[in-house]
Image: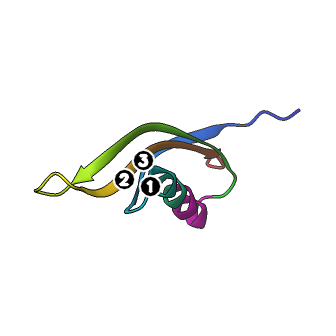
Amino acid sequence: MAESVYKVIELIGTSKDSWEKAAAAAVSRAGETLRDLRVAEVVELDLQLDAAGKVEAYRAKLKVSFKFEGS
């Protein structure tokens, strides 16, 4: 079996609706420019609040890995 190397990057997705949609937005956007996405791990969830303390957006921080093809 050939050895492989994977690169891990950190992304933050946002959504006005839910943490799930925020995470999905990050993975979807990453998939537009990266090939061979392998794993997405949610490492942190938080909320963006307005001046009155109301939820403006859900934010999901993810670690995403993909197969490294560099030299």
Q: Can you give x and y, in whole percent of width and height, for residue 26 in the image?
A: 49, 56
The span from disc 1 to disc 2 (Cα, nearest Å) is: 6 Å
Q: Residues within 10 Å of mark 2 (few under 14, many from 20)?
A: many
Camera-side residue: 51 or 26?
51
Instruction: Name the residue tied to disc 3.
Output: 60
Q: Is 1 covered by the magenta stretch?
A: no
Q: Amino acid at mark 1?
A: Ser
Going 44% across and 49% down the picture, which residue do you hit?
11
Instruction: Kindly identify which residue carries mark 1.
Output: 18
Please report whichever mark, 1 or 3, sits nearer to the chain's N-terminal start. 1
Comparing 4 with 43, the one in front is 43
Q: Secondary structure at mark 1?
A: loop
| Quadrant assignment, res 30 | bottom right
37 left or right, relative to 48: right
Cβ–Cβ under 8 Å for marks 1 and 2: yes
Q: Which residues are magenta?
A: 27-34
Residue 34 is marked as none
The residue shown at (60%, 59%) is 34
Depth order, front residue of 2/23: 23
Residue furthest to the bottom: 32
How far apart, in angstroms, are the residues tagged by discs 1 and 3?
A: 9 Å
Contact between marks 2 and 3 (CB within 8 A): the answer is yes
Place of residue 18 in the rendered image (x, y in percent of width and height, measured from the top left) = 44, 55
User: What type is the residue that disc 3 sits on?
Assistant: Ala
Helix or strand or loop: what does disc 3 sit on?
Answer: strand
> In the rendering, which numbered label is found on residue 58?
2
Q: Nearer the viewer, mark 1 or mark 3?
A: 1
Q: Secondary structure at mark 2?
A: strand
**Of callouts 1 and 2, which one flags the residue occurring earlier in the amino acid sequence?**
1
Disc 3 crowd rating (10 Å Cα; few below 14, some 14-19, many 20+) is many
Q: Amino acid at mark 2?
A: Tyr
